Amino acid sequence: MSAKTLSMCEGKPAFSNFDRAEKSARHQSREKDMPLMAYHCTHCNRFHVGNVSEHRQQEKIYKIRRQSAFAAQSVDD
């Protein structure tokens, strides 16, 4: 990992998949009484939890890619 990657991700829990990060985001949102969401980090290629407004665009892109992957998988089955 580069120094930039380490500084961008420092102190943030990293999750191996979107579902785990999303579950954590829901839990933290309730605890902190503020909207949080899971997002894919392009620096470490894992998933973090962050502020909704800050990561709304990244989340939309990830969901579109995820839906496309599931659709392609369904066609193959």
Image (spheres, rainbow, N blue to C red):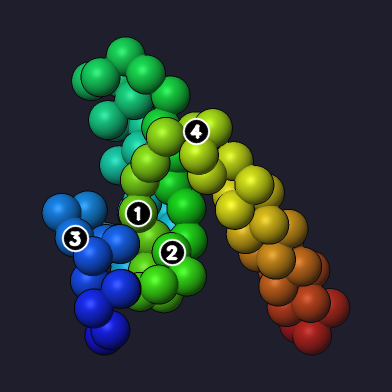
Say if 17 sits above or below 53 in the image: below
Say if 75 sits above or below 40 in the image: below
Residue at numbered disc 2: 41
Give, as a three-letter code, the residue at label 4.
Val
**Label 2, residues with CA under 10 Å away: few <14, some 14-19, many ≥20:** some
The residue shown at (64%, 47%) is 57
Residue at numbered disc 4: 52
Q: Is residue 23 visible?
A: no
Quarter where residue 13 is shown: bottom left
Say if 65 sits above or below 36 in the image: below
**Label 3, residues with CA under 10 Å away: few <14, some 14-19, many ≥20:** few
Q: Secondary structure at mark 1?
A: strand
Residue at numbered disc 1: 48
- Spatial CA distance of label 1 from label 4 is 12 Å
Circle on res. 10:
3
Q: Are marks 1 and 4 in contact (CB under 8 Å)?
A: no
The earlier-in-sequence mark between 1 and 2 is 2
The earlier-in-sequence mark between 4 and 2 is 2
Q: Are marks 3 and 1 in contact (CB under 8 Å)?
A: no
The earlier-in-sequence mark between 3 and 4 is 3
**Label 1, residues with CA under 10 Å away: few <14, some 14-19, many ≥20:** many
Q: Secondary structure at mark 4?
A: helix
